[in-house]
Image (cartoon, helix red, strand yellow):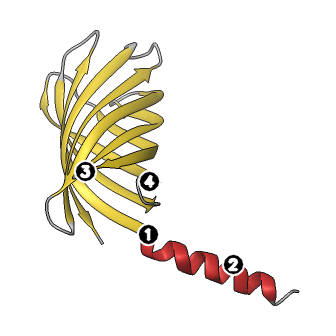
Amino acid sequence: MKRLIPVIIAAALGTAAPAQEVYVGAGLDYLYPHSGDPQSVASAIAGLGFDTGFFGIGAEAEYGMRVAGDNDYDTSRVRAWLSYDWMDYTFRFAGGVTEYYFEDENANGLNFGLGAQREITPVLTLRGELIRDFMDDNFTGAVTTTRVAMLYSF
């Protein structure tokens, strides 16, 4: 019995491995605070997911640095995501935590996002997404981010 458990675990991991997706990418984000000035951010994105046919699940982390705009803060997000494949498109719902880094303080909050992506080549994917950050009162109540990103899958 003790030998059977490692064999079952190895078989389960072996069957999940082909469905695994690891990706990195870059995005251009436009952040629009609902009380404040907008800014543009260049984001680096890295994630991991499992595809189970029509549905997928995974997680990703990102870090964005200011490119242009009147505000001066960097962003980071850690999110879990669910996806649904329909024809040539994949629709995504994501949620997680957000942090904005100012010179003298940080603002924390939650994020939710809706997006769609399409495979351009077997390793390149184009993604469009709307992300809503609900921040604490130190910064603003909410920030809406519009993103266009290109992802590279391994």
| Element class at badge 3 | loop
Residue 91, image quadrant: top left
Residue 53 percent location from the top left of the image: 42, 60
**Whole-Å distance between the Cαs marked 2 and 3?**
33 Å
| 113, above or below 56, in the image | above
Horizontal side of residue 30 vs 20, given as left or right: left
Q: Earlier in the sequence, mark 4 or mark 1?
A: 1
User: In this figure, which residue is indicated by the disc labeled 4?
Assistant: 56
| 107, above or below 81, in the image | above
Q: Earlier in the sequence, mark 1 or mark 2?
A: 2
Horizontal side of residue 78 vs 32, given as left or right: right
User: In this figure, which residue is indicated by the disc labeled 2?
Assistant: 9
| Element class at badge 2 | helix
- Residues at marks 4 and 1 touching, judged by CB atoms closer than 8 Å: no
| Element class at badge 4 | strand
User: Is the C terminus in the top left, top right, bottom left or bottom right quadrant?
Assistant: bottom left
| 88, above or below 93, in the image | below
Q: Please give the label number shown on residue 19.
A: 1
